[in-house]
Amino acid sequence: MASGVAIRPKRPGADATRERILAAALDLFSERSFEGASTRLIAERAGVQQPLLAYHFGSKEELWRAAVGQLFDDFNRSLGGRIFGLRGVEHTAVAKLVVADFVRFSAAHPQLHRIIMQECKVDGERLEWLVEQHIRPLFEGAVAMLEPLVAAGKVRDVPAVHLYYLLTGAGATMFVLAPECRLLSGVDPLDPSEIERHVDAVVSMLFTE
């Protein structure tokens, strides 16, 4: 939330209402883009009155930032918890598990990549905010994790920026394009067994052993 926004006292049920709004907003922003997701549609999807969006978030822009921020927070907690729990484990094994968790998170939350794709259609303030607040730290963390493994011959010898996009593209695209995948191949990419096959495929693509 931007600084300067007044903190309102919570009412009973306010947290549950706020979470419903965030979930609805995330789905619609990822499906229709910022411009296409009206506050009326978000309110309908959340099952709340439209004025409640302004009550909880002030503006559509702040709602977008809150929804995106919560999704990236969930992502960081998921992967951060994995890394914290693997302290002292051999670096290649840690990297493989982190890549696997990234693929699984992408399957469970395709909105993450859909929103990035929506905002990347044109340059703009939202994209700049998204990159600086959330994507750049992930890019830098991925590079720091993978570059030593490239030098050691454990990961494919590919320049860092290409390696990053190989990982994010291969890891997420099958789930972002799940309806196409079902029509094209008859495979449901969100079936748990297919998710694990995709985990294995992405790990095999990136790592040399």
Image: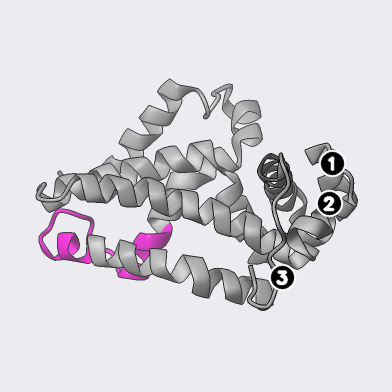
**Which one is in front, 60 or 154?**
60
Sequence-wise, the earlier of marks 1 and 3 is 3
Q: Quadrant of residue 105?
A: top left
Pointer 2 residue: 52
| Amino acid type at image mark 3 | Ala
- Residue at the disc numbered 1: 48
Residue 12 versus residue 133 in the image, above or below? above
Report x, y in % for residue 96.
24, 45
Bounds of the magenta segment? 147-165
Query: Residue tagged by mark 3?
Result: 6
Q: Counting other residues with Cα less than 10 Å from the Cα at mark 2, is it few (<14), some (14-19), or many (20 or more)?
A: some
At a point 38% along the width and 53% down the height, the residue shown is 167
Query: How far is the residue under mark 1 from the one under mark 3?
Result: 22 Å
How many other residues sit within 10 Å of disc 1, few (<14), some (14-19) or many (≥20)? some
Alpha-carbon span between mark 2 and mark 3: 15 Å
Residue 68 position by quadrant: bottom right
Q: Amino acid at mark 2?
A: Leu
